[in-house]
Image: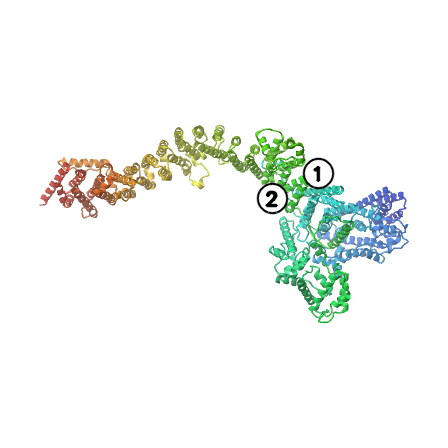
C-alpha cells in the first residue's frame, strides 16, 4: 500500500491531531518486533515495510518516527539469529541512510535553484533576498527546535515503556553506559533497544502531544551548548546516577569535563573559553551555537539526528575481557562505524559545509573516533581508520585541529610505538596509503601544519615514520617476519605513492621531451602561474594557531613570523625556515639552555630582554621542564632577571597557597640544587604576597617561603616510591611550627594543605611532561597488559585533546600553488633516498624492488622540475649504484634488480632529459659502461674487449660458487649475465636517448652535449682500453640535431668544438683520424645549409680544423685536415661565407710546415681560391681578406723559394683586387666602432693595410731574395696605386715601411745584420725617397719630418753603406723636391743638416788613445764618421749649387787664368741656393767651418795621426782629412761669396755687416793656412781654394773688390813667396794688375 501510494498517511491522526497518521502506522509496525523471539518472517516483513516507508516517495517519515524505524531495523540486525535477516537489516539501514542524506542534498539543491529562479523572475535585489532568507531561516530554526525537543522528550521515557522478555541481550547495550537504576523486571535488551537515541516506542500512541515541543527543543539546544561550552563530561558512573533525574535529556549526551591544556592546541582565549563557567560567556556561546546549528529544512534535521545517534552508538565502551566478535556490543559498534563510514562516503555539499553537521562531526564523531582509533579490535580500528581517511578527504578544511590530533597523537603514534601490534601498524599503513593517493591532502598537510609556526610537523613525521618503517629489521619468527615484510613493502608503497602524488601535483611544470615535436622547443610553464591560491576557513572568527599555540609570544606577535593565510609559497617557505630555526633552538635549549637562548636571540626568534625570555619559557611547551628549572635557578644576573620576570608573569590573586604553587610549578621541574630552589621559592613567596597583600595567614614573606619549601618536601615524601616511611599529618604540622614570625600557622590550614597534597601531588602540566619525554622505540618484548595500558593512555590523551580541539577555530589553507612541492621535497628527499636504497638492497621481492626504483624515478622527476641539483645528483648517483654501471665497481654479475635499475635509468634519461643538467654526466657514464658490458657479454673478441677483460677488476659476489666451480666458470656466469643486457630492449632504449635528443630544449641539449663530451674524454683517456663509444654518439646526435636553430647550435658547437679540439689532438692516431673525419662530415653538412652574410657560425664549426692542424704534430693528421679543407673548398665554395677565415688560418699554419708536399697542397688550394674564387665570390671572401693575405705571407716565408715567390706574386694580384673593387670594402659592415664610419677608411684597413703589413713581415722575416722581391712589390704597389691613397693612409703606410728599419725585427747575428743594412735597408731607403718624391705634395706636410728622422737613423748606424745611403737620400730628397720647399721646410731641412753634421763629426779623432781604450769598433766608427762628414759637405754643396754647376765653376776658374778677359759668373737655373734665406745659409756655413776646423786641426796634429795610423786607421798611409778640410772651406766660400755678391746695399747695410766679416775671416784663414802648409801634396789640394778666392775677387765689382782687397792684399802678396800652380799665379797676376790699376786710378 505504501509503495503504490495507497497509504500516504499525511492526514492528521485522530488521537493526536498534531501528528500525521503515518506515525501511528510506523509505530504499529515497529511494535511487531518484540525481540529475539520475533518470528523471522515477521522480522523480514517489518524490514521491508520500514524500508519502503522511509525510502519511498509516497509518504513522509520524519523526526522521531524516522528514528523509530531506523532503531527497529538496527535492533533486528542485532537480535535476529537469521543471517539473511541480519544482512537484510544492515542493507536496509544503509539504504535508509542513503535516502535520508540524498533527500537532504536534493532538497537543498532544489531550494537553491528555486531561489535563483525567483530572483530572476521577480528581479529581487540582494537586500530583499537576504531578508527573505533570514525569515526562512528563522522559520526553519523554530521547526528544528520542535523536532529536537520531540527527540529529547523521548530519551527518558523510552526505557520505561518497553516490556520485553528477560534474559535476552540486545544491541542496545551500547546505548547506555549503565542501567543499574532501571527496574529489575524490565528486560535489559529491551531497555537498550528503547535507549537507541532516547526515543520512546509509545510516542505514536499519543504521549508526544503531552509535551511542550518548544521546551524540549530548547532543552536539546541547551544540551548541545553545554557540550561545546560547559567544559564538563560525565563519567559513566555520573551518567548512571543522573539518568533517573535528568528529565528530557538523553542519557548518552556528553558533557565535557574540564579539559587540560593539550599540546599547545588552544590559544589562551580558547583555553579560557574551555574552562570558563561564567554565565555571560555561556550565554554568548549559546547564541553563537544556536545560529550555527540552525537547520533550513526538516530533512537536514533528520540527517543530523540520525548522524548524531550513530556517533553516540559508536562511542559505547566494550565489556572488559577479550572482545567477542558475536557480542551485541561489538556488532553494534562495528555496524555504527560502518554506517558512519557510508554516510561520510556519500556526503554531499550540505553535509560537508553546513555548520550544524561540522559541529556534530567535531563534538561527536571526532571524539568517538578518538576512542575507537586505539581499539585493540582490528575491525573497529580498521573502520576508524576508514572514517578518518574520509574525514581528511572531505572535511579537512573544517577539522584542522582534529586532524592534527589524529595524526600526531593516534595514528603516527601507533605506527611509531613498540606497544602497537604489527597488524595495527599495517592497517595504519593501509590508511596512509589512501591518504598518499590524494596529492591535495598531502600538500595541504604540509602547508597547514609543517608551515605553521604553532603546529606540529605532520608531513615531516609522516614521511620520517614511513621511511623508518620501510627500514625495520626482519622479525625472528616466520609469522612476524612475513608481517614485517608486508609492512616494509606497504611503507614503500606509501612512499612511492606520496612521491608520485607530488609529481602529479607539479605535473603542469613538467615537459616530457618525448612529447615535443619541434627541435629544442622551449617550454614556457612558469612556477606559480598555473594555480591560484585558495583559502577555506572553518569559521568566520578562527584562530590561526594549532595544537602548538603556546609557542613563544615573539612568533605570535611578530607579523613577519606568523603564518600568512595567503597561499604564498615564498612566505610559507620563510615561515617553515623560521620554524626549523625555532625547533633547532629548542633542541639546543633542552641540551644547554644558555646556548639555546643565545641561538634564538641571534636569529631574532625571541627578544633580548628578560621579559621576552620569560615569556618564551612560559609559552613554549616543547622546552624540557628540567632545563627550564635549571635556567631559572642559575645565579647569573640575566638568569635571575628572567626568573623574576617569569614569576611576575603569573597572577596568584585570590588563589589559595596550594593552587598557587601548583600553577607555579606546573611549567618547570624544580632543580636539585638547594641554592637554586631557594632562589626560586623565595621569589615565589614574594610574588604571592604581592598578589595577595591582604587576607593571608602569613605574617611575612619568610613564612610563605618556608611553607612553600615544606610543601615541596611533603610532595616528595608522599609521592616518591623510594621513601619507605611517609610523613604523617602530625609530622608535617610539627615541621612547620614557629615559621610565621615565631608563631604557628593555623592547624586547620596545615591539615588542609596536607590533605590536598596527599590526594594529588604537585606535578608538571601534561603538555610539559609529555613534550619533554621523547617517543622511544622500545625494541623489547611488550606484555599484553603493558600494551593495553599504553593504548589506554593514548586514548585518554587523544580524547582530551580532541575535546579541547573542538573549541579552537583554525584557518585552513587549500593550497593550489605548485611551488610548495619544492620545499616539501627538500625536507624529505634524504630519508626517501635512504628508504629506497635499503629497500632495493635488502628486500628480495620483485614488487618491492620495482617500488623502490619507481620512487627514485619520481623523486628524480621532482628534483629535476624544481632544479634541485644536489638532490638530483644524489638520487641519480644512488640509482647508478643500483645498476652497477660504474667504473669503480669493476665487472660484477648483473642480477635482475640491477637490470631493472638500468631500465629505470634509461627511462629517466628519455623522459626527464630537459631537467638533468649536469646529472647527464652520471647517466651517460652508466650508458657508456653499459655498452662496455654489452661488448663483453656479447662475446665480441677485439683488442678493446680483450684489454678490458684483462685489466678489469672481477668483483666476486659469490665466493662459494667460485670455490666450487672455479674462476673460469664464474667468469662465464658473469659474462652470461652481461649478455642479457645486449638484448634488443636495451639497445633500442639506449638509442632512443640519443635519437630523442632532438626533442630536448635549448638548455638541455647543451647540458647533454657537455656531459657527453666529458664522458667521451674519460673513455679516451683510459690508458688501458680507450673507447670511442661516446665520441661516436656525439657525431650521431650532431646529425640528429642538425635542424636546430642557429642560436642553439652556436651553444652546442661551443662545447663540441672544444671537444673535437682535444680529440683531434689525441695521441691515439685512430681517434684523431675519426675526429677529423667526423668533423669533415659535419662541416660538409653545415656548409650545405649555407649562411647569410654577417653571420659567423661557419667560422665556429670550422675552428677545430685550425686547432688540430696547429696542435697535432702528426703529419698524417695535418695532411688529412688540409685535404678535408681542400675538398670542402672544391665542393662548397659557393656556400662558404665566414668559414673562409678558418680555411685561410689552416693554410697559414700548414704553410709553416717542413713537409714540402703538405705546403704545396695547401698553397695550391690557396692559389686556386685567389685566382678563381676571388673573381666570383669576392663579396663572401672579403670579410676574410686579411686572413688570405696572412696565409700568403706564411707561404712567402716558407722554406721553399718557388712557393715564396709565387705567394708574393699572389699578394700583388690581391692588390689589384683591392684597387679594382673598392666598393666591396666600402660596403663592409661591423667595423665602425673600431675603424670609424668612413667608407674610405675601410678600404685602407681591410684592403691595403693587410697587404703592406704582410709584405713588411715578409721583408723582415725572409731571406734576401724573397725579401728583396717583397720590397720591390711593396714599393711597386705604392707607386702604382699611391695616387688613390688618402693622406691618413700614407701615415700608416710609412709606419709600416719604417718597420723594415726596426732593430727589434732585424737579425741578431752581426753578419746578417750587416748584410741587412747593406741590402734591404739600403734598397728600402732609396725606394722610400722615390715614393716620397713621387707623391711629395701629399706626403710632405705630415711625413717629411719622419722621413728625415729615418734618414738620421740610417746615418747613425755603423754600416757604411746604409749611412752613406742615408746622406745620399737626404741629398736626393732636397735636390728633387727643394723647389717645392717652403720656408718652414727649409728651416727643418737646415736643422736636420746641422744635426747630421753634429752626429757624424769625428771629434774623438783628436783624443783617441789606444792606451786608454782599444775599441776597434770605435776606430771604425770614427773612420765612418769621417767619410759621412765628407759626404755631408758634398751634399750641402750639391743641393745648393748642384753638382754640375760646381764642376763648371771650377773649370771656368781655370779658364779665366789663361783668358784675356774676366768672364762673368753664371748660375744654374735649377739651383736651390736662392730658396734659402741668409740665416739658413750662415748656419750651413757655420757647420762647414766646424768641419773645416776639425779637419785642419787633425791634419796639423802629426803625432795623433801617427798614433792612429799605427793603430790601423785609414790603411797604409797616415790618415788625414785634407779632403774634408778643403771641400768644407770651398763650400763655405762659395756660399759666402754668393751672399756677398747678392748683397747690393753695400757694407753699410745690416746684411753686409753680418756677411762680410765672415767672408773676410774665411778668406783670411784660407790664405793664411795655405802659407803655413809645408807639404807639396797638401799645398796642391788647396790650389782650387786659391783659384776660387782669386776668381771670385776678380769678378767683384769695384767697391766690393776694393773692400776685400784692402783686407786680403798683404796675405795674397805673401803667396808670391811660394811655388804656386800656374793657374794660381796667372790669376794672382791679374789680381795684382787690377789692384795696381785701381791704385793708379785712385792716385
Who comes first in sequence, dot 2 or dot 1? Answer: 1
Quarter holding the C terminus? top left
From the viewer's side, name the closer residue of 724 and 1153. 724
1625 with respect to 1377 (left or right): left
SS label for mark 1: loop
755 up-or-down from 210: above or below: below
Q: Nearer the viewer, residue 646 or 761?
A: 761
Query: Which residue is denoted by mark 2 in the rendering?
Result: 870
User: Is 233 rendered above or below residue 694?
Assistant: above
Residue 161 spot, x, y in % from top left: 89, 53
Judge depth for marks 2 and 1 and give the one in front. 1
Q: Which mark is residue 1365?
A: none
Residue at label 1?
845
- Neighbor class of circle 1 (other Cα within 10 Å; few <14, some 14-19, many 20+) is some
User: Marks 2 and 1, Cα distance to the nearest angstrom?
Assistant: 30 Å
Judged left or right of residue 1524, residue 879 is right
Work out which quarter of the rendered image holds the N terminus and state it. top right
Residue in the foreground of this view, choosing between 356 and 162: 162
- Residue 1176, picture quadrant: top left
Residue 409 seen in this snapshot: yes
- Residue 1157 appears in which quarter of the rendering? top left
Question: What residue is drawn where x is 14% and y is 42%?
Answer: 1612
Q: Where on the picture, by quarter, is residue 979?
A: top right
Q: Horizontal and vertical percent for residue 1229?
A: 46, 38
Q: Is residue 56 visible?
A: no
The residue most toward the front is 963
Amino acid at each position: 500500500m505504501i509503495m503504490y501510494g495507497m497509504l500516504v498517511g499525511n492526514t492528521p491522526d485522530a488521537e493526536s491531531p498534531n501528528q500525521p497518521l503515518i506515525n501511528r502506522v510506523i509505530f504499529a509496525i515497529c511494535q511487531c518486533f518484540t525481540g529475539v523471539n520475533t518470528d523471522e518472517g515477521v522480522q523480514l516483513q517489518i524490514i521491508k515495510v520500514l524500508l519502503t516507508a522511509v525510502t519511498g516517495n509516497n509518504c513522509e517519515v520524519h523526526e522521531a518516527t524516522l528514528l523509530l524505524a531506523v532503531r527497529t531495523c538496527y535492533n533486528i540486525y542485532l537480535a535476529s539469529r537469521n543471517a539473511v535477516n541480519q544482512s537484510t537489516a544492515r542493507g536496509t539501514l544503509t539504504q535508509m541512510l542513503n535516502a535520508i542524506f540524498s533527500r537532504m542534498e536534493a532538497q537543498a539543491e532544489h531550494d537553491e535553484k528555486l531561489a535563483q529562479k525567483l530572483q530572476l523572475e521577480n528581479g529581487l535585489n540582494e537586500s530583499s533576498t537576504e531578508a527573505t532568507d533570514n525569515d526562512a531561516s528563522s522559520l526553519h530554526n523554530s521547526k528544528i527546535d520542535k523536532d529536537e525537543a520531540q527527540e529529547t522528550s523521548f530519551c527518558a521515557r523510552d526505557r520505561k515503556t518497553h516490556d520485553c522478555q528477560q534474559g535476552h541481550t540486545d544491541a542496545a547495550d551500547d546505548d547506555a553506559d549503565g542501567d543499574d537504576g532501571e527496574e529489575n523486571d524490565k528486560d535489559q535488551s529491551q531497555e537498550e533497544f528503547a535507549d537507541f537515541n532516547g526515543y520512546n516506542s509509545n510516542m505514536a500512541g499519543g504521549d508526544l502531544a503531552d509535551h511542550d515541543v518548544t521546551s524540549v527543543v530548547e532543552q536539546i539546544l541547551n544540551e548541545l551548548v553545554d557540550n561545546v561550552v560547559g567544559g564538563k563530561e560525565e563519567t559513566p558512573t555520573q551518567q548512571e546516577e543522573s539518568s533517573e533525574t535528568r528529565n528530557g535529556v538523553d542519557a548518552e549526551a556528553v558533557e565535557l569535563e574540564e579539559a587540560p591544556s593539550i599540546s599547545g592546541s588552544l590559544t589562551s582565549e580558547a583555553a579560557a573559553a574551555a574552562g570558563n563557567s561564567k554565565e555571560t560567556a555561556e550565554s554568548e556561546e549559546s547564541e553563537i551555537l544556536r545560529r550555527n546549528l540552525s537547520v533550513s529544512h526538516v530533512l537536514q534535521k533528520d540527517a543530523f539526528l540520525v548522524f548524531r545517534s550513530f556517533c553516540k552508538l559508536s562511542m559505547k565502551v566494550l565489556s572488559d575481557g577479550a572482545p567477542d566478535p558475536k557480542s551485541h556490543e561489538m556488532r553494534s559498534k562495528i555496524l555504527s562505524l560502518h554506517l558512519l563510514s557510508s554516510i561520510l562516503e556519500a556526503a554531499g555539499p550540505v553535509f560537508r559545509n553546513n555548520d550544524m553537521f561540522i559541529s556534530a562531526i567535531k563534538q561527536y564523531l571526532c571524539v568517538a573516533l578518538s576512542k575507537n582509533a586505539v581499539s585493540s579490535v582490528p575491525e573497529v580500528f580498521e573502520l576508524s581508520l576508514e572514517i578518518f581517511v574520509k574525514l581528511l578527504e572531505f572535511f579537512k578544511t573544517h577539522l584542522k585541529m582534529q586532524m592534527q590530533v589524529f595524526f600526531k597523537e593516534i595514528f603516527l603514534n601507533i605506527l611509531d610505538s613498540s606497544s602497537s601490534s604489527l597488524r595495527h601498524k599495517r592497517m595504519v599503513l593501509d590508511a596512509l596509503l589512501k591518504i598518499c593517493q590524494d596529492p591535495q591532502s598531502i600538500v595541504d598537510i604540509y602547508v597547514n601544519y609543517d608551515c605553521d609556526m604553532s603546529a606540529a610537523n605532520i608531513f615531516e613525521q609522516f614521511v620520517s615514520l614511513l621511511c623508518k618503517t620501510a627500514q625495520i629489521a626482519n622479525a625472528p619468527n616466520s609469522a612476524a617476519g612475513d608481517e614485517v615484510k608486508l609492512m616494509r613493502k606497504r611503507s614503500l608503497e606509501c612512499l612511492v605513492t606520496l612521491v608520485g602524488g607530488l609529481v602529479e601535483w607539479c605535473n603542469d611544470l613538467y615537459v616530457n621531451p618525448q612529447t615535443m615535436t619541434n627541435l629544442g622547443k622551449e617550454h614556457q610553464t612558469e612556477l606559480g602561474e598555473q594555480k591560484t591560491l585558495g583559502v577555506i576557513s572553518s569559521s568566520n572568527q578562527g584562530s590561526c594557531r594549532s595544537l602548538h599555540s603556546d609557542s613563544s609570544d615573539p612568533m605570535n606577535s611578530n607579523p613577519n613570523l606568523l603564518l600568512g593565510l595567503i597561499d604564498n609559497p615564498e612566505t610559507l617557505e620563510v615561515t617553515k625556515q623560521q620554524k626549523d630555526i625555532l625547533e633547532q633552538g629548542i633542541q639546543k635549549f633542552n641540551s644547554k639552555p644558555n646556548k639555546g637562548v643565545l641561538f634564538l636571540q641571534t636569529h631574532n626568534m625571541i627578544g633580548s630582554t628578560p621579559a621576552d625570555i620569560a615569556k618564551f619559557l612560559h609559552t613554549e611547551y616543547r622546552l624540557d621542564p628540567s632545563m627550564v628549572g635549571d635556567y631559572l635557578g642559575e645565579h647569573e644576573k640575566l638568569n635571575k632577571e628572567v626568573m623574576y620576570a617569569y614569576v611576575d608573569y603569573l597572577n596568584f590573586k585570590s588563589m589559595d597557597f596550594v593552587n598557587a604553587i601548583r600553577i607555579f610549578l606546573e611549567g618547570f621541574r624544580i632543580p636539585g640544587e638547594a641554592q637554586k630552589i631557594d632562589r626560586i621559592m623565595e621569589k615565589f613567596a614574594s610574588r604571592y604576597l604581592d598578589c595577595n597583600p591582604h587576607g593571608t595567614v602569613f605574617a611575612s614573606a619568610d613564612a610563605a617561603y618556608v611553607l612553600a619549601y615544606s610543601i615541596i618536601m611533603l610532595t616528595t615524601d608522599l609521592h616518591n616510591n623510594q621513601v619507605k616511611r611517609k610523613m604523617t599529618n602530625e609530622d608535617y604540622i610539627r615541621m612547620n611550627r614557629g615559621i610565621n614570625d615565631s608563631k604557628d600557622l593555623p592547624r586547620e590550614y596545615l591539615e588542609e594543605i596536607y590533605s590536598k597534597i596527599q590526594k594529588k601531588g604537585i606535578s608538571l602540566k601534561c603538555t610539559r611532561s609529555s613534550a619533554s619525554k621523547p617517543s622511544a622505540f622500545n625494541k623489547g618484548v611488550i606484555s599484553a597488559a603493558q600494551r593495553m595500558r599504553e593504548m589506554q593512555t593514548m586514548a585518554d590523551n587523544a580524547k582530551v585533546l580532541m575535546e579541547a580541539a573542538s573549541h579552537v577555530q583554525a584557518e585552513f589553507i587549500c593550497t593550489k600553488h605548485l611551488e610548495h612541492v619544492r620545499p616539501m621535497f627538500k625536507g624529505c628527499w634524504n630519508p626517501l633516498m635512504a628508504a629506497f636504497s635499503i629497500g632495493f638492497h635488502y628486500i628480495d621481492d620483485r614488487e618491492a624492488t620495482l617500488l623502490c626504483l619507481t620512487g627514485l624515478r619520481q623523486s628524480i622527476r621532482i628534483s629535476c622540475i624544481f632544479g634541485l641539483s644536489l638532490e638530483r645528483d644524489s638520487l641519480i648517483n644512488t640509482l647508478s649504484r643500483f645498476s652497477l654501471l660504474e667504473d669503480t665497481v669493476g665487472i660484477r654479475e648483473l642480477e635482475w634488480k640491477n637490470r631493472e635499475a638500468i631500465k629505470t635509468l634509461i627511462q629517466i634519461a628519455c623522459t626527464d632529459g630537459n631537467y638533468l643538467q649536469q646529472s647527464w654526466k652520471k647517466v651517460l657514464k652508466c650508458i657508456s659502461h653499459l655498452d662496455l658490458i654489452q661488448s663483453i657479454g656479447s662475446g665480441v673478441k677485439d683488442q678493446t674487449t680483450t684489454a678490458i677483460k684483462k685489466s678489469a677488476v672481477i668483483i666476486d659476489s659469490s665466493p662459494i660458487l667460485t670455490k666450487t666451480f672455479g674462476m673460469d666458470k664464474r667468469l662465464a656466469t658473469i659474462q652470461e649475465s652481461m649478455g642479457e643486457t645486449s638484448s634488443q630492449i636495451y639497445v633500442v632504449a639506449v638509442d632512443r636517448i640519443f635519437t630523442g635528443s632532438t626533442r630536448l630544449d635549448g638548455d638541455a641539449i647543451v647540458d647533454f652535449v657537455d656531459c657527453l663530451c666529458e664522458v667521451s674524454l674519460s673513455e679516451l683517456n683510459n690508458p688501458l682500453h680507450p673507447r670511442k663509444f661516446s665520441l661516436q654518439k656525439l657525431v650521431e646526435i650532431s646529425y640528429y640535431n642538425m635542424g636546430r636553430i642557429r642560436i642553439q647550435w652556436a651553444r652546442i658547437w661551443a662545447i663540441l668544438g672544444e671537444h673535437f679540439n682535444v680529440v683531434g689532438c689525441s695521441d691515439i692516431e685512430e681517434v684523431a683520424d675519426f675526429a677529423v673525419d667526423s668533423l669533415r662530415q659535419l662541416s660538409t653538412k653545415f656548409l650545405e645549409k649555407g649562411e647569410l652574410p654577417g653571420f659567423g657560425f661557419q667560422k665556429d664549426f670550422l675552428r677545430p680544423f685550425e686547432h688540430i692542424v696547429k696542435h697535432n704534430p702528426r703529419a698524417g693528421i695535418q695532411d688529412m685536415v688540409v685535404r678535408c679543407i681542400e675538398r670542402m673548398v672544391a665542393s662548397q665554395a659557393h656556400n662558404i661565407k665566414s668559414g673562409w677565415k678558418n680555411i685561410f688560418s689552416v693554410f697559414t699554419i700548414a704553410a709553416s710546415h717542413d713537409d714540402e708536399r703538405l705546403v704545396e697542397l695547401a698553397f695550391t688550394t690557396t692559389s686556386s681560391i685567389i685566382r678563381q674564387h676571388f673573381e666570383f665570390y669576392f663579396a663572401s671572401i672579403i670579410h676574410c681578406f686579411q686572413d688570405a693575405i696572412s696565409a700568403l705571407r706564411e707561404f712567402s716565408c716558407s722554406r721553399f723559394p718557388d712557393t715564396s715567390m709565387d705567394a708574393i706574386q699572389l699578394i700583388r694580384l690581391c692588390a689589384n683586387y683591392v684597387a679594382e673593387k673598392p666598393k666591396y670594402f666600402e660596403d663592409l659592415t661591423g667595423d665602425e666602432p673600431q675603424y670609424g664610419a668612413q667608407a674610405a677608411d675601410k678600404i685602407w684597413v681591410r684592403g691595403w693595410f693587410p697587404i703592406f703589413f704582410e709584405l713588411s713581415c715578409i721583408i723582415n722575416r725572409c731571406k734576401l731574395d724573397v725579401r728583396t722581391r717583397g720590397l720591390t712589390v711593396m714599393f711597386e704597389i705604392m707607386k702604382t696605386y699611391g695616387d688613390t691613397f688618402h693622406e691618413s693612409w700614407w701615415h700608416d703606410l710609412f709606419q709600416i715601411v719604417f718597420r723594415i728599419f726596426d732593430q727589434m725585427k732585424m737579425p741578431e747575428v752581426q753578419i746578417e745584420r750587416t748584410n741587412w743594412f747593406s741590402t734591404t735597408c739600403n734598397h728600402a731607403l732609396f725606394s722610400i725617397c722615390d715614393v716620397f718624391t713621387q707623391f711629395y705634395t701629399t706626403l710632405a706636410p705630415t711625413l717629411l719630418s719622419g722621413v728625415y728622422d729615418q734618414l738620421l737613423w740610417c746615418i747613425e748606424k755603423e754600416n757604411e753603406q746604409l749611412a752613406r745611403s742615408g746622406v745620399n737620400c737626404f741629398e736626393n730628397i732636397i735636390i728633387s723636391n727643394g723647389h717645392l720647399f717652403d720656408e718652414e721646410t727649409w728651416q727643418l731641412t737646415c736643422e736636420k743638416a746641422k744635426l747630421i753634421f753634429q752626429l757624424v763629426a769625428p771629434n774623438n779623432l783628436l783624443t783617441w788613445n789606444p792606451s786608454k781604450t782599444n775599441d776597434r769598433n770605435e776606430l771604425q766608427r770614427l773612420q765612418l764618421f769621417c767619410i759621412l762628414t765628407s759626404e755631408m759637405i758634398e751634399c750641402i754643396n750639391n743641393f745648393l749649387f748642384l753638382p754640375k754647376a760646381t764642376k763648371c765653376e771650377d773649370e771656368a776658374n781655370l779658364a779665366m787664368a789663361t783668358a784675356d778677359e774676366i768672364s762673368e759668373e753664371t748660375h744654374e737655373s735649377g739651383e736651390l741656393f736662392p730658396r734659402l734665406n741668409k740665416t739658413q745659409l750662415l748656419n750651413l756655413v757655420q757647420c762647414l767651418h766646424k768641419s773645416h776646423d776639425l779637419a785642419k786641426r787633425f791634419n796639423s796634429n802629426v803625432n795623433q795621426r801617427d798614433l792612429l795610423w799605427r793603430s790601423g786607421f785609414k790603411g797604409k798611409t797616415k790618415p788625414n782629412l785634407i779632403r774634408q778640410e778643403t771641400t768644407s772651406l770651398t763650400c763655405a766660400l762659395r756660399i759666402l761669396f754668393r751672399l756677398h755678391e747678392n748683397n747690393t746695399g753695400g757694407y753699410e747695410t745690416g746684411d753686409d755687416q753680418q756677411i762680410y766679416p765672415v767672408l773676410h775671416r774665411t778668406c783670411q784663414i784660407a790664405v793664411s793656412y795655405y802659407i803655413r802648409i809645408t807639404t807639396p801634396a797638401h799645398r796642391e789640394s788647396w790650389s782650387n781654394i786659391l783659384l776660387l778666392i782669386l776668381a771670385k775677387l776678380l769678378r767683384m765689382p769695384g767697391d766690393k773688390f776694393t773692400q776685400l782687397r784692402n783686407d786680403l792684399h798683404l796675405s795674397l802678396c805673401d803667396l808670391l813667396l811660394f811655388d804656386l800652380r800656374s793657374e794660381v799665379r796667372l790669376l794672382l797676376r791679374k789680381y795684382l794688375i787690377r789692384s795696381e790699376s785701381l791704385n793708379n786710378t785712385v792716385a
